[in-house]
Image (tube, rainbow, N blue to C red):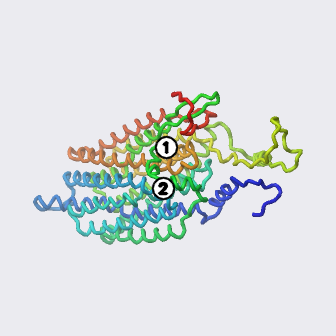
């Protein structure tokens, strides 16, 4: 674009604004390519999720009858409390190894993003996930205790390339392409596309396991990982621009591994009066999200395990259950969540969005004087400098308060639905619980919006890594702890009591989030190297 007489001599800010507009302006633009990548990867991962529960039940059934008398009589030979408890324990070990690998994967993938960029970091994650699913094909073929060990041990591949890593890559890419005022909604859209992919993966995985054999879903997933790797290599956006050389050098240091942890630490803010205060909002936000994920992270597995043990659900029925759960969650996040965020911010802030002559006012404010008489006199007697166009006012996100409000009350809805699921006495009631739980989703993308808005632009990737790290750690603990709890309750014939434990933790997370407060109005964050005296609040 050719410069004219109204163009500022220093063109900072113009390139960024143009690229953000292009990112969301075309059907196959960078933002939509990222959403499609999320759908493809979630679809591939979802294909194996339902068969894994079923194949572990079959392998645990084989293990049980290897040291017990063979089954005689009609009915399902695997329909025993001992097998249900053993399956819950082995699935919990698998989930813990997956989540444990995912925690380290966040640090390693974050490092890959800093040195390679989003595209090749994404390719590394998809390729290694393809390698991991190939080992799962071997585990299904071997079967028995050896098959379970192959599944659990080879989850260690996820330390370098795993599901948490590819989601971190895509969230980082979105944060670079979307304006702050739209970022929370687009985080939700990305999560919605991932949920839709997961839904169709659940459905296809269950059908493939029933129609063909239990190994076919894993074989199909391997070829889809190959396709996703090629898609990422050729079509995934590389980013919005070049990073400063100093930032590139810092990304290669050992401190880059621990940068996400520093994001959650308390930060100092300077009030209008000049006083320095500390804000602990990010700590309580992270702790509240931790409690929320800790409460609800086991819900999909719990629904499948409960439906399988109490109502004898097959892979197809579990596939329908998880398809409905993920599809409704995806539709909610893709279409309803952005509207809730937009309307909620207007309600929360008490001011409608600018319309009509708002654009002309902004245009007049950004007018650049070109005649000598248009420059204001400088009181200090210095030569006036040519003004440089400032970023648009829309770049500032004024809806962080409602985002935090939304996170809190999502946990309340989650606890109510989870509590109600404990009273299920028929299979359709399990389906109903699975269909209602998605309406409590949205806390994770809203939390990402709050976290990224409270950080500097160069810390957005670390902020996303931090909130994802919190979620992964909570998932690790919830799959381990609630797997043991469900196994213990199954032994005494009361597996539904696990839902009450989940609901109680969701309420606790809601209480913790009420201690998370945003920085004081009109305050300014103080850099770490500021030497002014701190005053804690």
Q: Position of residue 342 (x, y in %)?
A: 61, 46
Number of residues whose C-alpha sits closer than 10 Å to that of mark 2, classed few (under 14), some (14–19) or many (20 or more): some
Residue at 59% x, 62% y: name it. 30
Numbered-mark total: 2
Determine the residue located farthest toward the right in the rendered image.
Answer: 373
Q: Position of residue 287 (x, y in %)?
A: 43, 39
Residue 323's disc number: none
Q: Position of residue 266 (x, y in %)?
A: 49, 36
The residue lying toward the viewer, choosing from 448 and 60, is 448
**Considering only vertical position in the picture, is 123 above or below 289?**
below
Determine the residue located farthest toward the left in the rendered image.
Answer: 69
* Residue 133 visible in this rendered orientation of the protein: yes
**Would you name the residue on which mark 2 appears?**
252
39 to the left or right of 525: left
9 to the left or right of 167: right
128 to the left or right of 54: right
Instruction: Give the alpha-carbon distance from disc 2 to disc 1, as whole Å.
Output: 18 Å
- Quarter placement of the N terminus: bottom right
The image quadrant of residue 399 is top right
Mark 2 or mark 1: which comes first in sequence?
2
Q: Secondary structure at mark 1?
A: helix
* Residue 356 visible in this rendered orientation of the protein: no
* Nearest to viewer (mark 2 / mark 1): 2
Mark 2 and mark 1 in contact? Answer it, CB < 8 Å.
Answer: no
172 to the left or right of 303: right
Q: Position of residue 303 (x, y in %)?
A: 34, 51
Residue at 41% x, 42% y: name it. 290
Q: Secondary structure at mark 2?
A: loop
Number of residues whose C-alpha sits closer than 10 Å to that of mark 1, classed few (under 14), some (14–19) or many (20 or more): many
**Would you name the residue on which mark 1 appears?**
263
């Amino acid at each position: 674009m050719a410069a004219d007489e109204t163009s500022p001599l220093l063109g900072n800010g113009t390139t960024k604004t143009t690229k953000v507009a292009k990112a969301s302006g075309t059907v196959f633009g960078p933002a939509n390519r990222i959403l499609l990548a999320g759908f493809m990867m979630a679809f591939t991962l979802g294909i194996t999720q339902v068969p894994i529960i079923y194949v572990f039940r079959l392998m645990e059934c084989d293990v049980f009858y290897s040291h017990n008398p063979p089954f005689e009589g009609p009915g399902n030979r695997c329909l025993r409390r001992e097998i249900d408890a053993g399956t819950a324990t082995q699935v919990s070990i698998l989930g813990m190894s997956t989540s444990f690998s995912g925690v380290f994967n966040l640090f390693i993938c974050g490092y890959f993003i800093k040195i390679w960029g989003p595209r090749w970091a994404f390719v590394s994650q998809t390729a290694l996930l393809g390698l991991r699913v190939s080992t799962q094909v071997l585990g299904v073929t071997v079967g028995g205790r050896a098959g379970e060990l192959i599944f659990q041990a080879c989850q260690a591949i996820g330390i370098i390339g795993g599901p948490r890593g590819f989601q971190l890559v895509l969230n980082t890419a979105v944060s670079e392409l979307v304006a702050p005022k739209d970022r929370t909604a687009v985080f939700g859209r990305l999560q919605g596309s991932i949920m839709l992919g997961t839904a169709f993966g659940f459905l296809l995985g269950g059908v493939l396991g029933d129609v063909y054999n239990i190994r076919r879903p894993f074989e199909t997933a391997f070829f889809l990982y190959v396709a996703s790797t090629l898609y990422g290599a050729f079509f995934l956006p590389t980013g919005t621009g070049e990073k400063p050389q100093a930032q590139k050098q810092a990304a290669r240091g050992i401190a880059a591994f621990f940068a996400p942890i520093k994001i959650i630490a308390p930060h100092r803010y300077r009030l209008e009066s000049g006083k320095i205060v500390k804000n602990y909002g990010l700590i309580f936000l992270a702790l509240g999200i931790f409690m929320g994920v800790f409460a609800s992270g086991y819900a999909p597995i719990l629904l499948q395990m409960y439906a399988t043990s109490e109502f004898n659900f097959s892979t197809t029925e579990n596939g329908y259950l998880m398809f409905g759960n993920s599809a409704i969650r995806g539709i909610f996040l893709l279409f309803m969540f952005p509207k809730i965020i937009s309307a909620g911010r207007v309600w929360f802030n008490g001011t409608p969005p600018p319309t009509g002559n708002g654009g002309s006012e902004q245009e007049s404010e950004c007018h650049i004087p070109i005649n000598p008489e248009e420059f204001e006199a400088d009181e200090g007697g210095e030569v006036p400098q040519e003004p440089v166009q400032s970023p648009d006012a829309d770049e500032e996100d004024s809806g962080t308060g409602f985002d935090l409000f939304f996170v809190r009350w999502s946990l309340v809805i989650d606890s109510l639905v989870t509590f109600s699921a404990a009273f299920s006495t028929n299979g359709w009631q399990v389906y109903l619980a699975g269909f209602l739980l998605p309406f409590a989703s949205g806390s994770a993308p809203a939390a990402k919006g709050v976290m990224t808005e409270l950080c500097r632009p160069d810390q957005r990737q670390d902020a996303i890594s931090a909130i994802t790290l919190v979620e992964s750690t909570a998932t690790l603990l919830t799959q381990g702890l609630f797997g043991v709890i469900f196994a213990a309750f199954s032994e005494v014939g009361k597996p539904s009591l696990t839902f009450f434990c989940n609901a109680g933790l969701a309420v606790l997370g809601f209480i913790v989030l009420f201690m998370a407060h945003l920085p004081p109005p009109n305050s300014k964050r103080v850099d770490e190297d500021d030497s002014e005296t701190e005053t804690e609040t």
